[in-house]
Amino acid sequence: DAGVIQSPRHEVTEMGQEVTLRCKLISGHNSLFWYRQTMMRGLELLIYFNNNVPIDDSGMPEDRFSAKMPNASFSTLKIQPSEPRDSAVYFCASSLSIGSDQPQHFGDGTRLSIL
Amino acid sequence: KQEVTQIPAALSVPEGENLVLNCSFTDSAIYNLQWFRQDPGKGLTSLLLIQSSQREQTSGRLNASLDKSSGRSTLYIAASQPGDSATYLCAVEGYKLIFGSGTRLLVRP
């Protein structure tokens, strides 16, 4: 099994640019989670989906952030326009289901730097 | 609002020592508690998951316990090795996964 795959691994871009982060779930997993990790705030849940439907987006910081699941195996997180305070490591995770005995499997993350 | 606290924030021990990492949470209405390991520049790797009805889980040299009523969990690492050096995070799952800030472990050869 390939695990959760995120791309790109690193992204450096200028303030105001659109950023798109990508995530491929583990085959057969129904739940998808986007997290952001910073030194100041630790690991925070941004949004999660179950069966392609967004369940809770209360962690999305602003309207500049949006996430989609165009199909059962793929998700994108977009930031438009980006700002320096968005710099962080963004993780995607998937699991078989929410609230069960199934752990979440994490990708290696995208390290985002906004100049 | 669920809050998860991990103590200590950092720990340095000589190789071979047994050690305990602590995690506490404020709301006992959880589905499960999970321990993760994070290596520098990497994602999180799930180590152990304890369902709310369970008291402990074991995997190799790792043992995790859960006391829901007191809002506490411990991760016990036996005979620590330099390869165990990493950040260990605990997380509780209610309707979503809430993480502690982690314990940064260094095992010295």
Image (cartoon, coloured by chain):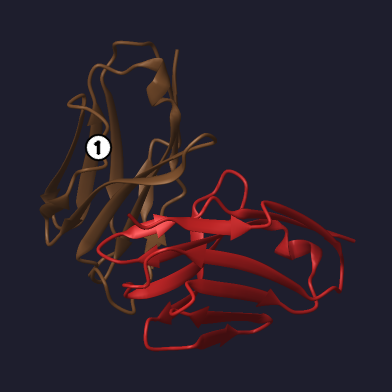
Chain colours: A brown, B red
Instruction: Name the residue: 42% across, 55% down.
Output: B3
Q: Splitting the image into 4 quarters, where does residue A78 fall?
A: top left
Say whether residue B105 is left or right of residue A8. right
Residue A28 appearing in the image: yes
Instruction: Name the residue: 80% across, 62% down.
Output: B82
Give neighbour class at mark 1: few <14, some 14-19, many 20+ (Cα, 10 Å).
some
- Mark 1: secondary structure: loop
Instruction: Name the residue: 29% across, 11% down.
Output: A16
The x and y percentages for residue B36 are 52, 64
Residue wearing tag 1? A60
Q: How many marks?
A: 1
Where B101 sits versus B47, above or below?
A: above
The x and y percentages for residue A39 are 54, 36
Quarter of the image containing the N terminus of chain A? Answer: bottom left
Question: What is the three-letter code of the residue carrying label 1?
Answer: Met
Chain containing the residue with disc 1: A
Q: Splitting the image into 4 quarters, where does residue A73 fall?
A: bottom left
Quarter of the image containing the C terminus of chain A? Answer: top left
The x and y percentages for residue A28 are 22, 70
Instruction: Name the residue: 28% across, 57% down.
Output: A25
Residue A2 appearing in the image: no
Say whether residue B5 is left or right of residue B62. left
Where B18 sits versus B12, above or below?
A: below
